[in-house]
Image: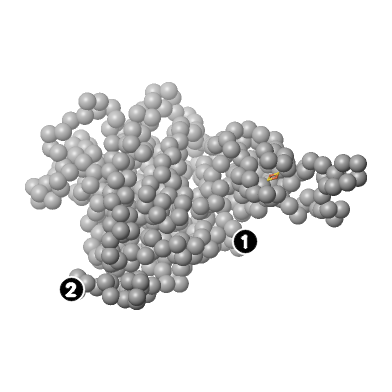
Amino acid sequence: MDVNRGLSGNSNGFDRAWPDDATRIPDWIYTDQDVYKREIEKIFLGRHWNYVGLECEVPEPGSYMRSYVGPFPVVVTRDMDGALHVFENRCAHRGVEFCREYRGKADSFICPYHNWTYDLKGDLTAIPFRRGVKGKGGAPKDFEMSEYGLRRFRVSTRGGVIFATACEDLESIEDYLGPEICAEFDATFDGTEFTLLGVHRNILPSNWKLYQENLKDPYHATLLHTYLTTFGLFVSSNESNIPTDKYGRHGGLLSRRPEGRPDVSEEEKSNMQAFKQTMELNDPRVLKFFPEADSKWSGSVLTIFPTLTALRQTNILNTRLLVPRGPNEFMMLWTVFGRSDDDEEMTRHRLRQNNIFGPAGFLGIEDNEALKFLQDGIRKAMPREGLAVLGEDDEATDTLITERAIRGMYRYYRDVMGF
Ligand code: FES
Ligand code: FE2
């Protein structure tokens, strides 16, 4: 193996040609501004369904919330007839990001700068001094309000999850997910009504794709996370499955937790520094599991390309929306929810258990650090290629010691991006 591979190349030390092998991932896809611009065109505004929120976040006519399609701020509304709309949060006049509250109820949006007013569908309904004063000034005579509404996205929902796309003729959500992923998606989003329990927001100094990779990477989960391994939530010996859709763009990490502490072999222990045999929790209630989904998996993480991850771990239900902020940074919006028929005790349990995840969670914090260190290495060091060599592409899908799903995503990505 030539360890200097990637050090030669053109005069700026930067070679755009993707190595002819999905096991090699070039550094520049995580750091380059031109790559990021192309992602906006080909991915976020391309032929993809972008997750924007849950129906329980806009529960009633007149409800709205702020969200994002890729990096672009949008507003999600439910109009007075109950229909959902997604439109840009950018005034058609001078460009103000007019919706400032994260969520609420409204019957219109009035831009604070010059008070142009939009309805819940994003149509422009009023502009002050349209005819000027005393016959002077004002909008041009031929100004048609219908031409200056907010730009809208197409909207679709499945199981209470809202998606938006700029593409006019995209396949249904069901076809977009594909049968393997759709089945697991439906096990969590099974048609019950959800209630919003809370939202975390945090900003990570890393490329957005690294977070999708992280959740397609069962290998790290068995090594980095003391909490997961020690308390048996995700251990290499658990029964598990790593499905992907036919394109490789979506994936799942599915795992079934044993009763009690995991039965870990000496071989596994010798490979897992994070496993702490004698560690105990002061409050073991956080690990309690009340089976609730029609699925054999007690842990299910779905990565839906491009920017949704949906988690059902024990009794934690949450989604994460990845909001790119340039190549080197993204924001994460975690939406934590429960079922509307939960009693108070179950709600307390879900909230308590949610301490496992989130920006400062018992294990979420480790991923945040790892991804910062990863971006540091990629951004600051001499360019090289990352490796995703573990496991076989045609192996059975029940081993966790594999990087098959990461390779799958990048085969799809290369294709869409034209690299
Ligand atoms: Fe919104 Fe002028 S920028 S009304
Ligand atoms: Fe992790």
> From where the camera sits, is residue 370 visible?
yes
Residue drawn at 68 percent across, 40 percent down: 113
| Type of amino acid under label 1 | Glu
Residue drawn at 36 percent across, 38 percent down: 358
Secondary structure under badge 2? loop
* Relative depth, front residue between 131 and 76: 131
* Precedes in sequence: disc 2 or disc 1: 2
Give the image quarter of residue 3: bottom left
Judged from this view, the residue extending furthest toward the right is: 135
Left or right: residue 376 versus residue 150 is left
Mark 2: C-beta under 8 Å from nearest atom of ligand 2: no
Secondary structure under badge 1? loop
In the image, residue 20 sits, relative to residue 84, either above or below, namely below
| Type of amino acid under label 2 | Met
Circle 2 is placed at which residue position? 1
Report the Cα–Cα distance between label 2 and label 1: 47 Å
Give the image quarter of residue 292: top left
Left or right: residue 132 versus residue 408 is right
Q: Are marks 2 and 1 in contact (CB under 8 Å)?
A: no
> Which corner quadrant of the figure contains ligand 1?
top right
Image spot of residue 355 (x, y percent): 33, 33
* Relative depth, front residue between 347 and 85: 85
Residue drawn at 28 percent across, 43 percent down: 366
Image spot of residue 61 (x, y percent): 65, 35
Circle 1 is placed at which residue position? 168
Residue drawn at 24 percent across, 54 percent down: 219
Give the image quarter of residue 344: top left
